[in-house]
Amino acid sequence: MSLFGSMTTAISGLTAQARALGHVSDNVANSQTVGFKRTDTNFVSYLTDSTQSVHRPGSVVARPDYTNTVQGTIEQSENPLALAIAGQGFFSVALPTGTANGQTTFDERQFYTRAGDFQMDRNGYMVNGAGYFLQGWLADSAGEPDRTRIQPIRVSDLVFNPIATANIELSANLPAGGTDPVSTQFNVYDSLGSLRQMTMTWTPSAANTWTLDVSSPAAGGSVGTIDVQFGQAAASPVADGTVGDLVNATGTMTGSTATLGEPATISFTADFGQGPQAITIDVGAFGAARGVTQYAGDEYVVRNIAQDGVPLGSFSSINIRENGDVAINYDNGQARVIARVPVTTFSAPDQLQRLDGQAFMRTLESGEARTADPASNGAGRLAIGSIERSNVDIASEFSKLIVAQRAYTANTRIVTASDEMLQDTINMRR
């Protein structure tokens, strides 16, 4: 029994070392695979009989020892959509199964990966090199993610609709004691996103009082006038040089009620061919030295004039922010958040089921998937424009290769010796 046991034990050693060699081979082959996690070897012995007086040969098996929690090197990438996780966690991804009615269909199972070499495909999905589609929380119109559902992220809003100008902010100083009209040209956007030129004309009408006229050729000329009183001209005492009252409005012009410290606004409507468009000019605050003021000076000085209208925009680019927000950039200078990329963690990530393409699936041993914002609740942070390299160390694998080779050779010697001893036993009869 001992000779046969020695031989079978050595044969199990050959099998174990062959498996260890297979792990090394797999690791070396994937040393440049993005997001790959190496497989080490854990040797486990099995006993036939072992007491204080007798020990019979047993066997050995080689089990895979996964390293899903071991971080690979994070490397900068020229791809702006590339992602890496610095710390624990996985990207949630979906596996396409085909198309139906022109739309991509996906496997209902959830998959996870550390391979973040994502790029946009022709349908607007973000797909990594292994063909898995990045999933996330889709955002509402305000850019807030809906954390109740996770699904593939798709860039489909390729046009940013125009926004008509509704508010204008003016910051300027009218020369105290001025006698000549002064004017400023500015642009607004109508409801179709067309740029319309308008003119503000300030005309001194009385002491510390200026008449504001707003006009536009596209709106048929003047839309109205209003008197803006400063300092001593106001009905209630206010600081000299600051807006005090907005009175004597004509046309579509109206002024807000004068209340010390409250915003001073002038409202009007202009029809550029699509119906009346309401616009409000913010000229500062009543009795406060901001916005439009009247102080000594030789010239009319415009410090700032801004409006909130936006023209029609087309897709320009896409970028991912450090908090995981996926934002579309448009050529009109606007941006829209369409989704957020979460990070999924497990209690025992080394127990995940491995799949093709550096992907994993949840198992009973791995625990439940916990999806959270990046850098929160134990999840790692996102490294934008980076990829995680394989965690394989070539030098270490070559060392394992040498050990496996020598151990395999040693086991063959045991098989040979056992065979010779068995042959001698058989020859004893002669």
Image (tube, rainbow, N blue to C red):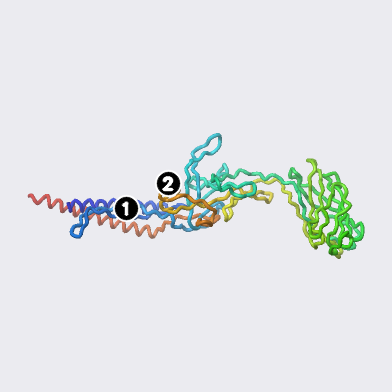
Closest to the observer, 388 or 363: 363
- Image quadrant assignment for residue 183: bottom right
Q: Residues within 10 Å of mark 2 (few under 14, many from 20)?
A: few
Q: Is residue 421 visible?
A: yes
Closest to the observer, 11 or 277: 277
Name the residue furthest bottom: 296
Under mark 1, the amino acid is Ala
Under mark 2, the amino acid is Leu
> Is residue 265 found left or right of 66 in the rendered image?
right
Check whether the beta carbons of the residues at disc 1 and disc 2 lie within 8 A of each other: no
Residue, disc 2:
355
Q: Position of residue 406 (x, y in %)?
A: 28, 58
Q: Is residue 353 visible?
A: no
Q: Residue at x 41, y 53 (%)?
A: 350
Closest to the observer, 403 or 160: 160
Residue, disc 1:
62
Q: Secondary structure at mark 2?
A: strand
> Which is nearer the N-term, disc 1 or disc 2?
1
Give the spatial CA distance, label 1 vs label 2: 20 Å
